[in-house]
Amino acid sequence: MFEFLWLIPALPLVGFVILLLIGPRLCRVRVAIVGVGSVGLSAVAAIITSVEFITSSPPNLAYTQIVRTWMQAGGFAPEIALYLDALSVVMILVVTIVSFLIHLYSAEYMAEEEGYSRFFAYMNLFVGSMLVLVLADDLVFLYLGWEGVGLCSYLLIGFWYKDAANGRAAMKSFIVTRVGDTAMAIGLFFLFTNLGTLQIQELMRLAVEQWPVGSTAAIAAAALLLGGALGKSAQLPLQTWLPDAMAGPTPVSALIHAATMVTAGVYLIARTNVLFTLAPPVQFAVAMIGCATLLIAGFSAMTQFDIKRVLAYSTISQIGYMFLALGVGAWSSAIFHFVTHAFFKALLFLGAGVVIMGLHEERDMFKMGGLRKQLPVTFWTFLVGAASLAALPLVTGGFYSKDAILWHAWLSQKGGLWLGIGGIIGAGVTSIYAFRMVFLTFFGETRTSVTKRPTSIIRLPLIILAILSVIIGFIELPHTLGNVRIFSDFLSTALPATTVTSTTVGSEAIFEILCGAVCLIGVYIAYILFLHRPHCTDELVSHASAATAHRLWFSGWGFDWLYDKFFVRPFVWVARANSSDVIDLIYSGLAGLTQVLHRVLSGTQSGILRRYAMGIAIGAVLAIAIMVFS
Amino acid sequence: MSAVPMEHGLLLAGLLFAVGTAGVLVRRNIIFMLMSVEIMLNAAGLAFVVAGSARQQADGQIMFIFILAMAAAEVAVGLALVLQLYHRFNTLDADAADTMRG
């Protein structure tokens, strides 16, 4: 069955080509069948492949399928090859299933929109690129998927291109991620010149052989790849594009945040974990960046009005957790959090989409409220998603994945007390903003009434995702609670295990109680501030220092302002100043001379016949004179 | 037959040619310009005939017959153009037809 591995990325790409060529001429039902069906078939293929992989493991627990050699230039011969191991099995399962549910939802959600087939064409390309990215066996092929994902995010964020603000948001996301992509491209050049190949497994083997731990080359390579990962995964200092990416339709946000795009950076680091292990300073930087990002984004999320911006900041924050896990060497915990996050974040975005659709594109949470009775299915599923985001103890998937990350951040060999404390503070903040969202949107008095209720096609993905985001947690339980290790055992064939300094069951139990308590305290604070005594928040904000903090957090810690001052404006100034420099003078002089000559010559074309005759006569006289007198 | 010296004949041809050229350059009426062109043609023809008779050969007269044929064709085309000009601009002033400038 592994021979059909290539079908998994190929199916969405075929869907894209069909929709691109004949999409505008098809009726909406057929467009939806092609768009949703191609991803659905891809999901079926992924499930069959994964079952096959688990039941009858291939030799060496990895399967490589070489489709063909892409190009041949001297020693450089990147191959279009797919590599299937435990890590890519997890990735393709999550990507295809979540994408399929989002596609199903969009078939109904986008039904009234113009450009229906264009939307599905881009979405299919998006999923196809992401699958290329996670299955690629060669860094060049991976880079193809990497750029494809970036392109699709640009196209989809600017989907409603008639509004110029959306176009600007799309460009911002493209340019900011381009900064990271450039670092990554340089990283690829660097790896190729130093190790002579870009085939990932070979590269990792050579890196271990040739570079000692902590060598400059390893640090440079890991740092450059990290640059790419920071851009795609919206981590400090390249996180500013993600909140603006909310300009796109809601299913696009769900796709970008849950299944594709932003998790690419996490995947890249997990895939090249050998390089990062060889470069301890860079790996420590990953942990620090993750920790800083999760705190900064968490505080920003607490102050947003727009429900989608809250979710955007929460994604940045949750990816920060994944980076923290990667940085402390808890590879499988990072991927586990990616899985649970994919389910609950897709769920939250789709739920937010129902709310926004029901309230006439209203995104301000303070104008919502009391939707619990009017949208019961959405309310319960959204509550499950928010609980999972807040890591509500014992029942949610988010608890188990986040708990594992925090535990490792604190106690693994590369972790530390401060990283652990940062993560726990972040967890408290997370539960505050998650339940702030729930309380403001679904509880309290009704401020706007719902005009459009979701149909069953929209409810179905919500219910499936809610079930998944609960049960997924039970495939990996800590020692104290049953010690189930299905997930990390499965991934141990592809990712190295985490080394923990000292661990006793007792301390782990205390730690879990602490995490659970932090979460519940966060929920209680949110309840007090936003439901029980809403005037408390007004009193808080009336303090000068609190108001300043609120403004700072609301603007995302002023990063946009900072970048505008330090990068955008100087660049624009230089561009302006440079637009008429010395070199330009030569060319504009040339153009001016041509224009003068043109005017003189066109003056001779007077249209008066006698002048032409005069010209001929004078010319003849001169010619004869020259002939006679020379 | 008393021979006219060749110089006299050529001088006359040159004068006729100068008169024709001056007519083309000075006249604004297109019919007169056409007539001046005819004078120039005849001047050239006269030069051929004079040169032919000076050398006692028939070439000059044959060339003149060529020129006559060409002049007939030229007049036919020229008069057609004159008619067109008159239709378009309602005048025979050549300077009025200066729309092809620049």
Image (cartoon, grey):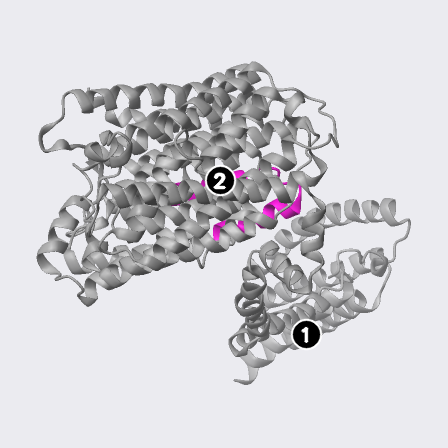
Q: Is residue A555 above or below residue A321?
A: below
Q: Amino acid at mark 1?
A: Ile
- Residue B3 visible in the current orientation: no
Identity of the residue drawn at 46% across and 22% down: A35
User: Observer-nearest residue: A570 or A620?
Assistant: A570
Q: Amino acid at mark 2?
A: Leu
The chain that hosts pointer 1 is A
Q: Quadrant of residue B37?
A: bottom right
User: Does the magenta portion include A168?
Assistant: yes
In the displayed structure image, the side of residue B34 where residue A233 appears, left or right? left
Q: Quadrant of residue B96?
A: bottom right
User: Does the magenta portion include B31?
Assistant: no
Q: Badge 2 is on which residue?
A: A520
Cα distance between the residues tagged 1 and 2: 104 Å
What secondary structure do most residues of the magenta stretch adopt?
A: helix
- The magenta span reads A147-175
Disc with the residue nearer the chain's start (1 vs 2): 2
User: Observer-nearest residue: A330 or A165?
Assistant: A330
User: Observer-nearest residue: B68 or A242?
Assistant: A242
SS for callout 2: helix
| Residues tagged 1 and 2 counted as in contact (Cβ below 8 A) | no
Q: Is residue A125 above or below residue A549?
A: above
Q: Nearer the viewer, mark 1 or mark 2?
A: 2
Identity of the residue drawn at 35% across and 56% down: A419
The number of discs equals 2
- Residue A279 visible in the current orientation: yes
Residue B85, percent across and down?
Answer: 83, 49
Q: Badge 1 is on which residue?
A: A618
Identity of the residue drawn at 24% across and 22% down: A49
SS for callout 1: helix
In the displayed structure image, the side of residue A604 where residue A2 appears, left or right? left
Outermost residue to the right:
B90
